[in-house]
Amino acid sequence: MKKHLPAVLFLLAAALLWWLSLAPRRHQMPVPEGQKPRVVTSGYVPYTLAKQLAGGQAEVSMLLPANAEPHSFEPTPGALVTVKNADIFIYVSDRIEPWAKDILASAGEHTAVVQAAQYADESDDPHIWMDFKNVRQIARAVAYALIQKDPDHRAVYQANLKAFETEITELDEAYQTGLASCQSRQVVHVGHLAFGNLTKNYDLSLSALAGSSHDGENSVRRVTELIQFIKENQIPAIFTEETLSPRLSAVVSEETGVPVLPLYTVEHVSKADFDRGVTYGELMRRNLESLQRGLGCQP
Ligand SMILES: [Zn+2]
């Protein structure tokens, strides 16, 4: 009998591991009955998606103040407590929010963490939500997390997800037809490199003033190069980010005589838009209108 002991112990250990793997972990367990899941998001992209998918069934808040840009934010000690108490924490990625690592360490045992970038295709441009395919996948992951935390409202979350997916399909079609025939396909953006995934998908080329963060690398040399480029290539219009100082684009516009149109990164929005709860779809429709006007596309 004794010689079988190691084998018996091994089987027992294996059975225990198997049983533990079946038991739900705390971060997968639903919130107590009658309680709304508390969803905390890093910035506006996951915030607006969670709001739309929860449709009032969850308490959604975001760490980043409205109108603050996400790449160089520094979380307050209060933010760590907020995440510790969250049922769901959603962020985009370490590339977009380098500060998310510190936040994650303080997530509570019961906090389900959704990292949006896990559901996106590989891309050089970390602004993954500018690709409708990615947004669809991210929305599914968010809806799944809501259902897991609040299974009683599964039907609501599923219906909201379905409506959102229809909206994304319609947006994609509007971009395809709306940008099919344009005088120019060159998007010149006096801002940071946030629209690479969008321009790539609709066969537009992109030149931006700065790199993929807002770290103020707008050297005089780069501005001069951009002005030169606009003149040499008969660029009909330039685009800027609403939340950037309008001075720079005004200078470029004055030097080149071309108009300035807004593009919305969604990662940060104006206070007014935040207060009225502007959605991802609305901002992307505004972007399409700007692109059509600026590039001279046939309606
Ligand atoms: Zn950005």
Image (cartoon, rainbow, N blue to C red):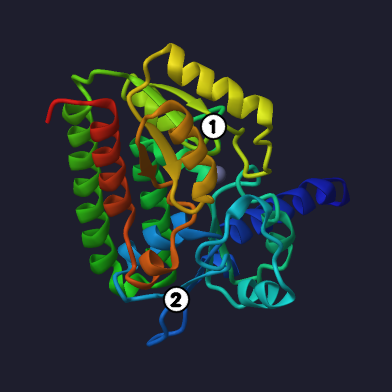
Mark closer to the chain start, 1 or 2: 2
* Ligand 1 - quadrant of the structure image: top right
The amino acid pointed to by label 2 is: Pro
Q: Disc 1 to disc 2, how far (Cα)? A: 32 Å
Q: Position of residue 16 (x, y in %)?
A: 67, 59
Q: Is residue 132 left or right of residue 107?
A: left
Q: What residue would you read off at disc 1?
A: 125
Reply above or below: 9 against 194. Answer: below
- Measured along the vertical axis of the image, is residue 296 above or below residue 275? above
Mark 1 surroundings within 10 Å by alpha-carbon count, few (fewer than 14), some (14 through 19), many (20 or more): some
Q: Amino acid at mark 1?
A: Asp
Is residue 129 left or right of 69 when viewed as pictured? left
Residue beneath label 2, please?
Answer: 37
Spot the residue most to the left: 299
Q: Is residue 127 visible?
A: no
**Rendered residue at 30%/18% (across/down):** 184
Residue 9 place in picture, x, y as percent: 78, 53
